[in-house]
Amino acid sequence: MKQLQQNLQKEINGLKEKIAQNEKLLKKETDLDMQKLIEEEIETLKEQIESLKESLNTANPTETSTNLTTIEDPSKIKINPNEVILEIRGGTGGDEAGLFAKDLYRMYTRYAESKNWKTEQLSYSENTSGGIKTVSATIKGPNVYQKLKNESGVHRVQRVPTTEASGRIHTSTATVAVLPKLEKVQIEIKPEDIKLDFYHSGGHGGQNVNKVATAVRITHLPTGVVVECQQERSQLKNRAKGMEILQGRLFNMMQEQRVGKISELRASQVGTGERSEKIRTYNFPQDRITDHRLNKSWHNIERVLDGDLDGILEETSSI
């Protein structure tokens, strides 16, 4: 945590220097419009300093550990049935995997729209072809966890990429994780098991959103689980949301591995994106979607990718 405090203080000092530079410019500037812009910039920088100070005040290992509870039995953890965290990552297959991940993200968000669910994007990272490296979002709606929980796993696509001149069919994958929002009680995550990194938020296409490093990347060292959050302008809020995502990821791993403590978790090999781990295949040449857990197929891929998921989700609810 000492390194965290040093990083936060470095950010604060850098912002103070920018404020001092802007104040010097303000004294010399005679144009009223420019004066207004400089004053607004100073005010924004001051707000960002206050946000970082909040993070600095809470970057205390003792305080962090006392606010968390050890869970001996994961079955006793209460889940909010009306909120999930959706994570999608491009897997095996290069640029095509990222484009498929983008298709899946659109599929789930369109489905959420059809149900009048609320979606909030938390982080978004593109590859060079405009596909998705990784994206995470919260989805809120009645019984959303029950509806989507069985979507977690590796999704495989077989199709001819738009960049394939010879018409050859490629096989690519993307991983989907549907994480529960835990209620009331938190899973104990030791401060020494966490690595925090801060970076500048970026929007679609790589444009810079914030001038200060408010985006947060959290790495759980024992398991290698990494989460990112960049939606909020406050570093403190991004870190809080990132910890919620991390708790959901670790809770899922505890259930999969049938263990009661985080200390008993082993690094998970599930969901690495390898083709052999698939739960579902989207075969474009045959216009067929096959769920390998049910050994059942559906047709009309384009309609499904446009958000028409009710038929598939009703069948997979029994898994």
Image: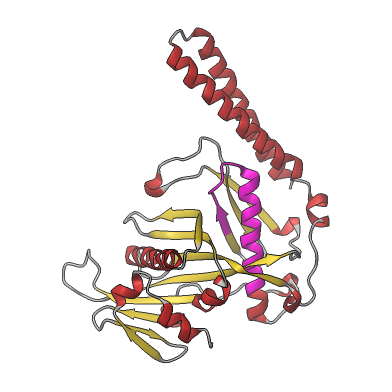
- At 69% from the left and 44% from the top, the residue drawn is 4
Residue 156 visible to the viewer: yes
Q: Is residue 319 left or right of residue 68?
A: left
In this view, 197 is above or below 291 = above
Task: List x then y, in percent, for residue 315.
Answer: 46, 86
- At 62% from the left and 55% from the top, the residue drawn is 242
**Residue 246 lies within the magenta run:** yes
Image colouring? secondary structure
Q: Is residue 306 left or right of residue 140?
A: left
Query: Which secondary structure is most common in the magenta stretch?
Result: helix
Compare residues 254 and 32 and report the one nearer the observer: 32
In this view, 3 is above or below 15 = below
- At 71% from the left and 39% from the top, the residue drawn is 54
Magenta region: which residues?
A: 227-252
In the rendered image, the residue lying farthest to the bottom is 295
Task: List x then y, in percent, for residue 268.
Answer: 60, 74
In the rendered image, the residue lying farthest to the left is 166
Q: Is residue 245 left or right of residue 64?
A: left
Compare residues 102 and 258 and report the one nearer the observer: 102
Residue 279 visible to the viewer: no
In this view, 127 is above or below 148 = above
Task: List x then y, in percent, for residue 40.
Answer: 52, 24
Task: List x then y, in percent, for residue 129.
Answer: 31, 56
* Count of marks overlaid on the render: 0
Residue 192 placement: quadrant: bottom right
- At 57% from the left and 73% from the top, the residue drawn is 143
**Residue 204 lies within the magenta run:** no
